[in-house]
Amino acid sequence: MARTGHHARGRRDAGGPRSRIWRAAGSLAVGAACAAALVACGGSDGKEVSAFDVKVGDCLTPPSTVKAEISKLTIRPCSEPHTEEAYAIVDYATTDSSGQSTGDIGYPGSDALTTYANSVCAERFAGYVGVPYTDSSLYFTFLLPSARSWQSANDRSVICFATTTGGQSLTGSIKNSKR
């Protein structure tokens, strides 16, 4: 099954300068299913942390209210039911044709960041899950820097999450699970 494109979720939130933009990878139908799963599966159990404190291997259930920008996420033990797991954190970088960094740039915009995130998250998926994304039963979604966090917090990180769709829950880490 081909999984391309992205689907923005929700509305803008006054999350302040340390908020991030939430994007889902997948077809519009998959994106809609992911958004529905977010609403249905959000919970209040777990430890609320800044989106900037998420680490690779953290398991979570996304916020119960769908927002385009978020500043807090609820981390929970991977042994408890959850719908997402962070599997990569990659800084957005621009390079010239020789592969040399072109230095810091202004906010590149949502479209450029989304294109970058789709590429880097698909590329890093197999190294964490143990199978190529195209062979997996899981999907991915990601957090992008917002224009405010880019400017005020020097935020350049894309956070990639493996996720399920519908009402499915994960009950263990997906690292090397070959799912």
Image (cartoon, helix red, strand yellow):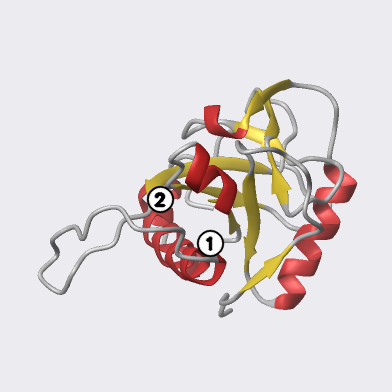
Q: Mark 1 points at which residue?
A: 136
Name the residue at the right extreme: 40
Residue 137 in the image: state x and y as whole percent: 60, 61
Q: Can residue 146 be seen in this view?
A: no
Relative to 101, 48 lies left or right = right
Nearer to the camera, 125 or 170 = 125
64 shown above or below 7: above
What is the secondary structure assignment of the residue under circle 1? loop
Residue 67 in the image: state x and y as whole percent: 79, 51
115 shown above or below 69: below
Q: Which residue is drawn at 74% across and 58% down?
A: 165
Name the residue at the top extreme: 47
Q: What amino acid type should be assigned to the residue bearing mark 1?
A: Ser
What is the secondary structure assignment of the residue under circle 2? loop
Relative to 103, 159 lies left or right = right
Q: Name the residue under label 2.
A: 130
Q: Dot 1: few (<14), some (14–19), or many (≥20) neighbours within 10 Å?
A: some
Locate residue 74: give its quadrant.
top right
Q: Dot 2: few (<14), some (14–19), or many (≥20) neighbours within 10 Å?
A: some
Q: Is residue 68 visible?
A: yes
Nearer to the camera, 62 or 148 = 148
Nearer to the camera, 51 or 151 = 151
Residue 56 in the image: state x and y as whole percent: 46, 34
- On residue 61, the disc is none
79 shown above or below 60: above
Say which label, 1 or 2, has the lower sequence index.
2
Distance of mark 1 from mark 2, alpha carbons? 9 Å
